[in-house]
Each structure stands twice: as structure tokens, then as C-alpha cells.
Image: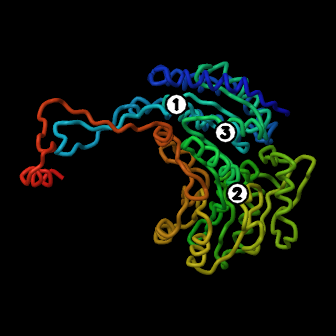
Amino acid sequence: MQFELNERAIDATLGTLRKAATSLKAHDYQWRIAQLDALFQLTEDHEKAICEALKADLNKSYTEAFVTEVGYLQSEIRHAKKHLKAWMKPRKVGTPLMAFPGKSFHYPEPLGVIFIMGAWNFPFQLTIAPLVAAIAAGNCALLKPSELTPKTSALIAELIPQYMDKDAIAVVEGGKEVSTYLLAQRFDHIFYTGGETVGKIVMQAASQYLTPVTLELGGKSPCIVDKHCDLTVTANRIVWGKWTNAGQICIAPDYVYVHESMKDAFLAALRKAITSQFGKQPQNSQDYGRIVNSNHLARLSNYLEGVESIEIGGEIDAESLYFAPTVVLNPPLTSPLMQQEIFGPILPVLTYDSHDQVIDMIGSREKPLALYLFSSDEDIQQRYLAQTSSGNMCINDTLIFMTNADLAFGGVGNSGMGRYHGKSGFDLLSNLRAVMKRPFILDVFIRYAPYNSLKTTLLKAFQ
């Protein structure tokens, strides 16, 4: 799909959004609820069309598309509506004796216009989920869906104006040229989901206006399989977490460390779980996705060049963009498989002798977006909690933490900055204005000059 840069139309859209942001209607509880209701209605009315677009762009099955995108968003909207009134209330804090009888509180107010840059791996969810937070916090928003998933992008551009307040929420489609132009404009917050390279470009562009940014990036999320685990359940959960959306998930297990004594049993359990979930020929499975485009297929294919230890899979069909669930055993730590985020259906499996070895290796790398540990040993669990760092951690499962809207989601260090979902998203896209309110009575004279020893002594006592 070809997109043209229409600067005049974009400028007009931004002007409309800025005007709406300065009005009081976005501050209103009823307006926010009405927009959330409209967004929910959009997902209900067009569930089939959304899932069909995701099928066309990524070969997502209807069930996967609903669970990971449409249904997920509906849960986010329900959660926001349920708690919105409480989130909007001023939050009382203590007041020092010096300011008695004053009152202090944090007052959540909208930031203004939020620029949301969607991602291609979950092109509906990762464009609309930040919008839920933006609306809940009373903001206006400009959405730019990913051009790499054109069917979903076009559908978002078609549906949003039909359901949402056109003065407050808009969509602009486009590729790199459009994104570059938009990033040169002034926003009150930029929300980007994607890779590290573009994340740095976004942050650099935002620095022109000192615009705050949220970067949801990725990295190499490790998965550790301890000797103390149910191997069948572990394998099933890893297969689900790794090969949903053909591995094109920023929080998918990027590589697995398994104890040397369990290597063969673990590989056998993986084979069984892959067959159970996708059949003996995953290419024929209705539930196994495809790579987004030929460029990414070539990138993934290059990772296997010269690799001799392919234990499972490795088959590729360029015409249909199929890349089989693939397991590689003990690739060198210097190989591209262990240096780059894979973001695809290749799973390196490495063996270890001690947890010291694994913890040291994780600590030597950039902090990942997620870390997974399979172990029933609480001492081991606590050790990884204390001695590793990641944006998110899940013990004895993969991905499932994303279903909890009360858990903040976001990266740390190289894997991103800023956390959202639920109240965290509301707070992220609000200005928590600090307010102190005082009456005219009980004016404490000792704070005023001229000072003397008595005033100084009393002021010290009030500290």
C-alpha cells in the first residue's frame, strides 16, 4: 500500500486536536465514559472484520486474534470504566505542620494531545490499548497504525472516525515519511511500541520539544527451566508463549536455559507440545501464523545460516511466508541468534550447570522486557527476583501476566521506559498536579523576615 504525505491535512488535524485539548470536555467524566463505550462498541460491532484483517496481515486464527487483540482490549476498556471515577479523584497526601491547617493532594489532569505509534505484531491491540489509557486520562489522541499491516491499518482509519469524537481522536496512515513528519510536530506525549532502533529516533525527535515519551521496546527475554518443575506443563506454556503469532511478540521467550541433566527430556517435551498445539505439519495448522513480510522472513532465515544444531523445525516456505517452529541447541553466545532479538519462531535452547552461570549471563546483557522462570523451588524464585532485573517477570508461565490490568507493563533500560495498563496507563498519561490549599487563618508569622534567634529556633522545630 502506498501512502502520500499530506502536510496540510495533518496540520489541520493537529490543529483540531489541540483546540479540543484546550476545551474542558475531555476533562469531563461523562465524555471519557462515552468515548470508552464507543470504543467498546466498535470492537463488538466489527469483531469479525478486525479478525479478518489480522488474518490477512499475519494469518492469525480467529481465536488468537480475538483473545490477544479484540477480547484483550474489551477487558482493558471494562477495567478502565469500572475504576475511572476513583482514578480521577484528587489523591490526598499529608501536609507538614508548617502549613497547618492546609490540605495537600495530587490532582490528575490530562496532558493534552497524545501521539500513539502502533506496532505491526499486534496491530490492533497495540494501537488501541494506549488509546484506552489516553481517553481514560482525558486526552486527545492521534493514532498512526503500522503500515506493515495494511489491512488492519486501513480498518482502524475507517472505523475510528465512525465511533469516536472526531475533534478529539484522529488517525493518520502512512509510512516512514509520514512518521518523520509527525515526529517533528509538537505533542504532549509520544507513545511508541516497536524496536530499539526506531525507539532511539523517537526519543531524539521528542527532545526538540522536551516531549515525554513512552517506549515499549523488547530485547532478549530469557526463560530458565529449573530441575524443580513439571516438564510437560512447562513445555506447553513455553510453546504457547513462544509460537503464538509465530513468535512475533516482544515478550516471547527469546531463549531458554535448561539444566544439562534435563536437556533431552525437555527437547522431547517441546516436540510433543508443538505437535499437540500445531500438529505434525504446523504449516497446515489453522492456528499457526505467518511472518509479516518477506524482509522479516529473510532476516530470520539469515539467523539459521551455518547453524548445524537444529533440533526441531527449520522449514521455510517463502511464498506463503511460513517459518516452522524451530529449536536450535546451544548456539554460540556470539552468534546472531544470541546477540539480536529474534522476534520470530526460532528458540535457542542452552544448557547450564548452575544458576550462578545463568544469572551472570543475564546480568551481562541489556535488561530484558520480560523474564520467565519455571521452578517450584521458592528459594530459586526469590534468587532470580533479587539478582536479575527485567521490565516484567512471570514465574511458571509465559505471557499470561498481560491479562492482569492491575499489573503495570513496561520495560527497563534498553527494553523501554514508561509503564501502562489499568491505573498505570491512566497515571502515565496524566499530569498528577501537586496542589496545596490553605485558608487565610492561622498565618504563621515566624516564616517572615526579619528573622531573630527565636524565629530561627522555632523554624528549626517545624522542620
- Residue 122 lies left or right of residue 132; in this view the side is right
Report the front residue among 144 and 394: 144
In the image, what residue occupies the spot 81% across and 46% down? 292
- Residue furthest to the front in view is 450
Q: Earlier in the sequence, mark 1 or mark 2?
A: 1
Q: Residues within 10 Å of mark 2 (few under 14, many from 20)?
A: many
Give, as a three-letter code, the residue at label 2.
Val
Q: Is residue 451 above or below residue 425?
A: below
**Where does the image place residue 96, in percent across and percent down from the top left?**
20, 45
Q: Earlier in the sequence, mark 1 or mark 3?
A: 1
Does residue 253 appear to the left or right of 137 in the view shown?
Answer: right
Side (left or right) of 138 relative to 199: left
Q: Hey, what amino acid is under mark 3?
A: Leu
Q: Is residue 21 above or below residue 253?
A: above
Residue designated by label 1: 112
- Using a 10 Å C-alpha cutoff, classify the residue at mark 3 as few (fewer than 14 neighbours), some (14 to 19) or many (20 or more): some
Marks 2 and 3, how far apart in space?
38 Å
Kindly state the secondary structure of the residue where label 1 is placed: loop
Q: Could you give the CA–CA distance between mark 1 and mark 3, rounded to whole angstroms?
A: 16 Å
Q: Quadrant of the N terminus?
A: top right
Q: Is residue 395 above or below residue 168?
A: below
Residue of label 3: 183
Q: CA distance from mark 1 to mark 2?
A: 42 Å
Residue named by callout 2: 239
